[in-house]
Amino acid sequence: MRVNSLVDEEIIDSLYAASRVGVPIDLVVRGICSLRPGVPGLSDTIRVRSILGRFLEHSRVFRFTNRGEPEIWIGSADLMYRNLDRRVEAVLRIHEPHVRSRISEMLELALSPDVSRWELEEDGNWRRVDTLDGERLQDYQQALTDRSA
């Protein structure tokens, strides 16, 4: 998933339940995140990162492996109770293969170990990751800009 905020208790509880049965979950959350990743017995399989850059991104993307039949959805809402319980929001499934492929490429880049990011630790603190083995990691937004040129 890629969202701006994740604070809705029902969504978080569902993600914890999925983690407890072994589902790997990768989240890119730009701002507020109330979920705690990596807590033994609760969220062992959940990783949370944040990518901040020159551009203020507002993407809401949901990709599910769906037992080998991948689905990608995009939407208007952040995973916050004010959005999910008090507003009219929309999500739609992406069917067009080339669009699904492009969105998957963007998600894969965002989840790559080669991208500069912040990682949420189990204690709720964010840790900056901008080098690997002494090498500076690539800027996600710059990489997307370069690819689109």
Image (tube, rainbow, N blue to C red):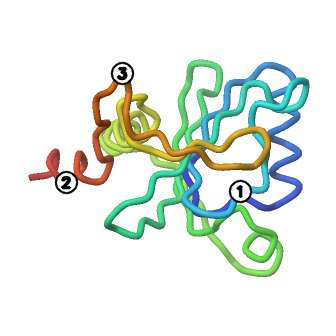
Q: CA distance from mark 3 to mark 1?
A: 28 Å
Name the residue carrying label 2: 145
Q: Is residue 89 visible?
A: yes
Which quarter shows the N terminus? Answer: top right
Residue 114 image offset from top left, x and y in percent? 35, 30
Q: Earlier in the sequence, mark 2 or mark 1?
A: 1
Residue 71 image offset from top left, x and y in percent? 55, 37
Name the residue carrying label 3: 133
Task: Return the residue nearer the eye: 122 or 14.
Answer: 122
Name the residue carrying label 1: 33
Say the numbered circle drawn on residue 63: none
Q: Earlier in the sequence, mark 3 or mark 2?
A: 3
Q: Residue at x 61, y 35 (%)?
A: 26
Callout in the foreground (3, 2): 3
Q: CA distance from mark 2 to mark 1?
A: 27 Å
Residue 18 image offset from top left, x and y in percent? 81, 31
Q: Residue at x 82, y 49 (%)?
A: 12
Q: Earlier in the sequence, mark 3 or mark 1?
A: 1
> Amino acid under label 1?
Cys
Q: Residue at x 37, y 34 (%)?
A: 131
